Image: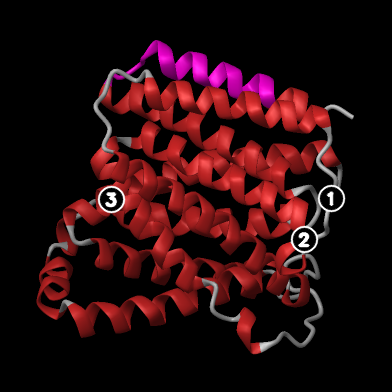
Amino acid sequence: MNARLLCLISFITGAIISVMVTFNTELGTLTTNEVSITINQIVGIITLTIVMLCFRKNETINPPRKHAPWYLWGGGIFGLVVITCNYFSVRGAGTTIAMASAVFGQCVAGLVFDLTGLMGMEKRHVGMKKTLGIFISFIGIIIMLCFSGESIRITYALIGASAGIITMIQMVYNSRLAGLKGAFFSARQNVISGLIGILLYSFAVMPEATITGWKAVPGIPILILVGGGVLACFVVVFSNTVIPRIPAATSSVLMSSGQVLTAAILDAALYNLMQPSLVIGSLLMIAGIIISNQS
């Protein structure tokens, strides 16, 4: 697949993440975070199963499968932590700041993977242009965080950053299963393991709140109910396709840029928030991406 197309898919994946987080947060607000996660996993399983059945003879969607070790089958557990972190950071700091915080985590994790080759990733040299580009992107994110005109608790920034780090780890983890089983199979297994985990947690730790949350489901618009789960399928499939094929630092910066730019657009469209710091920070991130991807 063409490198430019892979970079575009990375950027679109980041944009989808911001929209997905907005759906998940709204659903969690109307029910509970645990009910929101459960619904997302169910929608994801149904969506991916339908696609795999409809294209069962297509080797792109259903390629020949190889044996995968047992420890690659639990990617959904990472997803539970990510969704929970995103929920609290968005509730506490707003979509743009939450996504900007997550960007820090993703970029740092991407650099670590490239420099160390952790989790079977190819060890890559990080040259001066790439380092400079990523640094400029970091400056853009810092401007968003420090000059947004809002009083942001450090706790929410740390939660958002944690979500970014875990997101990158999950993407690399899932991409290894995808390399053996196919992107769609890996994505479905991701949501299956997530569903098992959230059901055990919900009914073991907070059964009353979970039951109350489910009672609110019939009154929720269908778009909010299924939006996050469907978009999550795209995120996992796209990331499974991209992560093994381009440097982790590049994919993390592109996804991060998509997240922050889309989050800023969402804040402007939904909450009438358009701050100069967000515009300046976004432009710096774009400049950093261009520099970091120059040969």
Q: Are the residues flagged by discs 2 and 3 in contact, CB closer than 8 Å?
A: no
Which callout, 3 or 1, points at the residue further toward the start of the chain?
A: 3
The residue shown at (44%, 53%) is: 162
Q: Nearer the viewer, residue 42 or 28?
A: 28
Can you tell which quarter of the image residue 219 is in?
bottom left
Residue 178 is situated, as x and y percent measured from the top left of the image, at 71, 70
Residue type, numbered disc 3: Phe
Name the residue carrying label 2: 117
SS for dot 3: helix
Which callout, 2 or 1, points at the residue further toward the start of the chain?
A: 2
Residue 102 is situated, as x and y percent measured from the top left of the image, at 47, 44
The number of discs equals 3
Report whether residue 70 is seen. Answer: yes
Can you tell which quarter of the image residue 266 is in?
top left
Name the residue carrying label 3: 88
Name the residue carrying label 1: 124
Measure the alpha-carbon separation of dots 2 and 3: 31 Å
Q: With 251 as the anchor, is 169 left or right in this view?
A: left
Report whether residue 293 is seen. Answer: no
Residue type, numbered disc 2: Gly
Q: Are the residues flagged by discs 2 and 1 in contact, CB closer than 8 Å?
A: yes
Bounds of the magenta span?
A: 272-288
